[in-house]
Amino acid sequence: MPAEEKTCGICFDTDFKAEQMFCVASCGHEFCVECVKRHIEVRVFEGDVHIRCPCYYHCKSNLTFESCVHLLTPKLRAIWKQSLEEESLPAIERVYCPNPKCSTLMSKTRLSKQEDGSMRCCLNAGNLSASIAKFLGIKTCPARITRDCVQILQKMLC
């Protein structure tokens, strides 16, 4: 007996097998995996944190990060996860790395000030000042590192 073919609630194609479908657990609406991926991508890039079921007709169910993680590219997974983490922090707790090329979210309570008043480094990959600080064994980001990485590199190379 042939497997039952499913219909996607977004593109309305009718030739999907059950394993090609994604079911929203809280409401039971079914969509093809490709349409769900595109839906999540659009919603995440538009800044949505809580992504609603693609069936907009009176459905108030949300997709969960955990139920969708296997569908996401690493980049999309990181962006959605970062948005969820940011949204979980009260606005007053949100602090961002001062490096204009970084701007990684950090929490005030997770950043303890050192005795000299400086804050711990943002060790986000690609942050040159943090990389230098880590290489030098500095656990804080002195202002001179953030302001003038070139000067420190010159001192290290000479």
Image: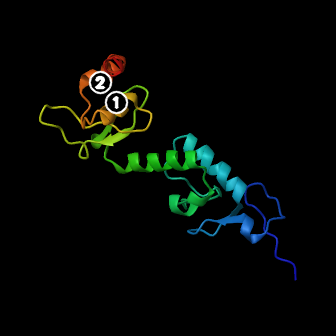
Rendered location of residue 151, percent (x, y): 32, 16
Q: Against 19, is 152 above or below?
A: above
Rendered location of residue 76, percent (x, y): 57, 47
Display coloring: rainbow
Say which residue appears at 32% left-offset and 22% top-offset.
156
Quadrant of res 31: bottom right
**Element type at marker 2?**
helix
Q: Which mark is residue 132?
A: 1
Question: Farthest residue in the bottom direction?
Answer: 1
Mark 2 or mark 1: whose residue is earlier in sequence:
1
Q: Which mark is residue 145?
A: 2
108 relative to 22 in the view: left or right: left
Q: Amino acid at mark 1?
A: Ile
Q: Against 15, is 140 above or below?
A: above
Q: Amino acid at mark 2?
A: Ile
Q: Nearer the viewer, residue 89 or 139?
A: 139
- 2 vs 1, front mark: 1
Q: Neighbour class for label 1 at 10 Å: few (<14), some, many (≥20)?
A: some
The reply to whether the C-beta atoms of the residues labelled 2 and 1 are less than 8 Å apart is yes
146 relative to 63 in the view: left or right: left
Q: Neighbour class for label 2 at 10 Å: few (<14), some, many (≥20)?
A: some
Image quadrant in which the N terminus is located: bottom right
Say which residue appears at 79% left-offset and 58% top-offset.
12
